[in-house]
Amino acid sequence: MRAPSAPLLSLPTSLGEETGPVFGHAILGDMDHDLVHNFAEPGESAIGPRIIVHGRVTDEAGRPVPNALLEVWQANAGGRYRHKKEGYLAPLDPNFGGCGRVLTDEHGHYEFRTIQPGAYPWPNGGNDWRPAHIHFSIFGAAFAQRLITQMYFEGDPLIPLCPIVGAIPQKDAVQSLIAELDMSRTVPMDARAWRFDIVLRGKRQTLFENRLEGL
């Protein structure tokens, strides 16, 4: 019901939008990759199951994409976003901001720590719920080079019930959005780990909300 009813317009970009700014490590804060602590008061931390999300960003040939800026945002462990227009009744966590960012290394790898988000009701239907998910924004060398997607968690029973997921006709495209539990990267007595690889182009590409070719 909130989808556009008319064809999207393609606007030409300028040289400045395509060539700059260039992202670098200097723009990142020391705690940008740690959503457990980057909004918390000293000595405090966010509430909820701690997780590590890691993966690799590659092109269609499997080549690593270094220095890509990944921005992430999500609901807290109760399923509530820190947003002034948030309508869900779940409590806010005073020590969780719900956003962070990280750069891929020379091999295309990235990693950040966070809290596993909760599911939340979706008001478009009578009893629709969105599965736990984390939003990703992947930037190239400039702000105009941006791809947006969502990461879901393997085994979540709400995934096939989600209206947004249900609007994706290809099973492979849905599977590209699901992170796998990675016990080899867990930290004992601290955090589980989930692996979410991102492929920018080609037949195996991750589904991006702002680039839905082939669907």
Image (cartoon, rainbow, N blue to C red):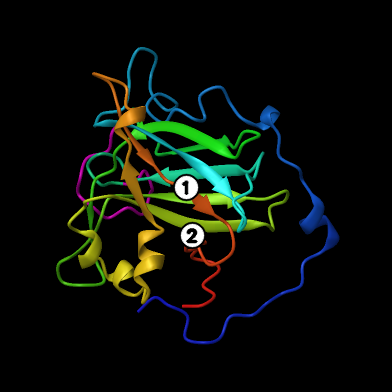
Image quarter where the N terminus lies is bottom left
- Mark toward the start of the polypeptide (1 vs 2): 1
Dot 2: element: loop
Q: Return the x and y of residue 182 as percentages of the image width and height.
A: 33, 36
Name above or below for residue 130 compared with residue 4: above
Q: CA distance from mark 1 to mark 2?
A: 8 Å
Q: Which residue is pictured at 56% across the width and 46% down the height?
A: 57
Please give the residue where the numbered disc 1 appears in the rendered image: 197
Quadrant location of residue 200? bottom right
Where does the magenta region start and end? Answer: 81-94
- What is the crowding at mark 1: few (fewer than 14 residues within 10 Å), some, or many (at least 20)? many
Amino acid type, callout 2: Thr
Q: Is residue 91 magenta?
A: yes
Residue in the foreground of this view, choosing between 196 and 114: 196
Q: Return the x and y of residue 128 as percentages of the image width and height.
A: 19, 66
Q: Which residue is pictured at 20% across the width and 59% down the height?
A: 158
Dot 1: element: loop
Using residue 104 as the reference point, say whether residue 135 is left or right of it: left
Tag of residue 206: 2
Amino acid type, callout 1: Asp
